[in-house]
Amino acid sequence: MKSGLRRYASDRNNALLSGVSRMSAYLHFGMVSPLRIAREAADVGGKGAEKYLDELLVWRELAYSFCFYREDHDQLMAVPSWALESLSNHESDARPQLPAWETLARGRTNVALWDAAQHSLLIHGELHNNVRMTWGKAFLSWTSDAASAFRLMTDLNHRYALDGRDPASYGGLLWCLGQFDRPFQPPQPVFGTVRTRPIDAHASRLDPESYSSHCTRRYVDPMPRVAVIGAGLSGLICARTLSDHGFDVTVFEKSRGVGGRMSTRRVEDVGSFDHGAQYFTVRDERFRRYVQSWVDDQVVELWAGKIAVLGRSESENQKAEKQSPERFVARPGMNQIGKHLASDLQIRFQMRVGAINRLRDGWSVVDESGSELGQFDTVVVSAPAGQAVDLLKEAPSLAEVAAACQMQPSWAVMLAVKDSIPVEFDGAFVHNSPLSWIARNSSKPGRTRDPEKWVLHANVEWTRGQESTDRETVATALIEEFARATGVLSSQIFPVYSTAHFWRYAIPSSPLDQKCLFDDALSIGACGDWCGGPRVEGAFLSGSALAGRVMGHWNDRWQVAGAVSPDEPTGHQLKLF
């Protein structure tokens, strides 16, 4: 400590040097007393100690006092009036780009220094003091107004920084917007008279490539190898979260594409059908954050189609319409979310896993012929409960829980017609019929409208009686039910294409209360909508939860084994949400 403290004044602003104390997280959680630090620094003496005590006793205490006396310290209104006025006067200034939340959170802006700083937060849970100022100033140019900039920088700082939510954090973030500072003339675009801190200027003093290597350094080498079996939504968000945090992840998918039950079927000269998940809703704020980011990136759009309820009274129909939630769809097909999440993952397609075999310290993943696909430290099973049971045989406690969750089947019919079906709705829940749902697929945003395309879903009871029926017979029967339910004459329906698809594991009838399953002793887990809830949102939250369990598991193992020094803060101690 003494030698580092003596160099503090000269080294503290260079993020490539070990010139700072990195005590913020320990102070934040009360693991060490600032009085003790102050006493020991004073005993060392010299210019380095003087500067360190200035940071500790003046600037840190200033932030603490400010937050104590200002209840609005977490609001933009806390900054000085001159800064508020100047920032307001420049709200209409052009911004070069407005990155979505997910782009920023993952450090994917293509601005090398800023992305490296965000990776430092994401992976290590800390950000060098001097770089944090440049990191924070950038939000003003990447959001529509100062209030949005403050909300976004606060969100990312508090979400990923180990010292997030600390008064000192608020002091630093508010400084980026003019707090504890003075006006600078002449006014600049976007910033007005608030001090600027251009990223390019900082990058000229700090080599971004070297800094990026520093920020993405591994805790251990090699990092744990993780196999994710299944490229549905839950498996993809789990895999991507772990990959973003530095884990070596391989995804195995039995089909030719990603998405699972969020698949899209494309037919030449006809167009595409969302024959699995039809849309999704948002209830959980954690999921909403991603959905809004996907909307900003034009991956997802609100489906404003009129939804009806057939087979019930008109008053019940009107009541259902009033209570209808917002419905979102991916564009140009529901599988676009899967493609978005999989964009930078290592995925081995058309690879059907036959078994997961326990090794002395890890797992061997093999295909159906018994050939080994690789050895891994952790395995994530992202598959329907029935399939997960077979894959979890060597984790009997998990297999037993998964076996208690039943998955129900459903037939889906894809129908394209020559002439538009004359009904006043775009989707409908169907009662008193073999059908449970019908949708004008071509009414969704980003889909081709000619020819008009419909997706028909059979209910569970009817499907159970038709599991061995051929696709052509199922399609014919359900198209007849479609005509009956809509009141359209069968003679008015002129199919130009029709086929049926059997979803053996369509709907979990009794989802588990827990978001995911994980065995710490064996380092294996499972996720899916049968854990998180029978919706797209449930699958997403389940995969996210399992990623958190895996990171927590390895963080504990590293600490026990001494692979990571207790003095080395790690971002894996963070909550994901």
Image: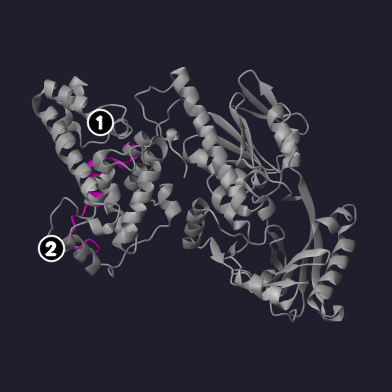
Dot 2 amino acid type? Pro
Which residues are the magenta region?
Answer: 189-210
Q: Is residue 205 magenta?
A: yes
Q: In the rendered image, which residue does mark 2 sit on?
A: 186
For residue 17, which numbered disc appears in the image? 1
Identify which residue is drawn at 71% across, 57% down. Answer: 276
Relative to 566, 475 lies left or right: right
What residue lies at 69% left-to-right and 28% top-to-bottom? 397
Dot 1: within a 10 Å radius of its alpha carbon, few (fewer than 14), some, or many (20 or more) residues? Answer: few
Judge by depth and name the residue closer to the eye, 208 or 484: 484
Q: Are marks 1 and 2 in contact (CB under 8 Å)?
A: no
Is 14 displayed left or right of 561 in the figure? left
- Give the percent coordinates (x, y) of residue 154: 34, 50
Please report whichever mark, 1 or 2, sits nearer to the chain's N-terminal start: 1
- The one nearer the camera, 414 or 518, is 518
Question: Callout 2: few (<14), some (14-19), or many (20+) C-alpha neighbours within 10 Å?
Answer: few
